Image (cartoon, grey):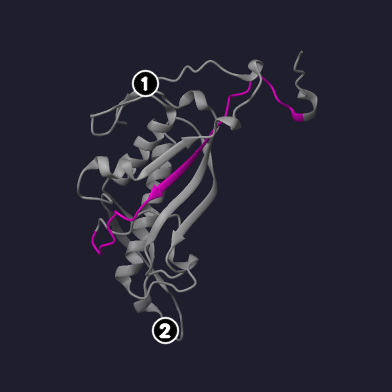
Amino acid sequence: MATVEPKALYGVSPAEPQQKYFTVAIAQGGFADSADANGGRVSPCIASDFATKPTTLAESLKVSRGNMRWRMMMEALAVRSNFRVVNIVTTYAADEGDSPITNLAFGLVFENGDYIPTTGTTIDGSTTTTTKALYLQDKIAEALNTTKTENCLVYDPTLVSSVKVRESSTTAVTAGPVMTGSIGEIVEAITVTEVTGFAPNTSGQLATDSALTYSAE
């Protein structure tokens, strides 16, 4: 028996980079929800996304830190290959800015799977990774264990009035590690799984994995 690929119909070429699809789940129940630099967890949401916006500036800063970590995470994941994010699901107890996120799930479709390493050393130097999924897990943990300060547009409920001239102000926001304990606990909260069925299923389209090794980048 033979398999004939409908290249004229789908524009599929064995010469094209082989994409990779991964699902990511981050269980955040153990992450800090304090009003300091460690609070805010990680979320793509900003204050205006909630049905009820944050009621205090402290709560709004948590939302800003969470969104800042999301962007830091995206930057860390883009080190080796371009990608797009799909199927984002955020879990909150309620649709209000004062409610902390408990779980975050999303998908990552990488433009070129070959550029994602399979072997290397984790950020704490304790473990050798053996798969692309473990590399991505490590990069996410690295972003969530980083301290960074940047100017952000922060929703400030103290500015809100009946006139509503403005609701936000540019503020220097510092986001620190989501947990102050073991780095390993951050890693354990992250699950990355490769969706193998997303890859080409004919031998002519399967590329030889030439990914490099890595250490903490």
As drawn, the label of residue 178 is: none
Mark 2 or 1 closer to N-term?
A: 2
Instruction: Please report the residue visible at 52 percent of the width from the left and 37 percent of the height from the top.
Output: 83
Instruction: Decide which of 19, 67 is in the foreground and name it.
Output: 19
Left or right: where does residue 179 sit relative to residue 167?
left
Q: Which residue sits furthest top?
A: 1
Instruction: Please report the residue visible at 44 percent of the width from the left and 69 percent of the height from the top.
Output: 94
Instruction: Decide which of 28, 168 is in the foreground and name it.
Output: 28
Instruction: Please report the residue visible at 79 percent of the width from the left and 29 percent of the height from the top.
Output: 9
Picture coordinates of residue 179, whole percent (x, y): 25, 50
Instruction: Decide which of 147, 113 is in the foreground and name it.
Output: 113
188 vs 95: above or below: above
Instruction: Please report the residue visible at 49 percent of the width from the left and 72 percent of the height from the top.
Output: 51
Picture coordinates of residue 176, whole percent (x, y): 26, 51
Q: CA distance from mark 2 to mark 1?
A: 55 Å
Q: Which residue is mark 2?
A: 161
| Highlighted range, magenta | 10-36
* Magenta-drawn stretch contains 176: no
69 vs 160: above or below: above
Q: Which residue is mark 1?
A: 213
Of circles 2 and 1, the one toward us is 1
The secondary structure type at the circle numbered 1 is: loop
* Magenta-drawn stretch contains 25: yes
Q: The N terminus is located in which quarter?
A: top right
Q: Is residue 214 visible?
A: no
> What's the amino acid at mark 1?
Thr
Q: Is residue 9 visible?
A: yes
The secondary structure type at the circle numbered 2 is: loop
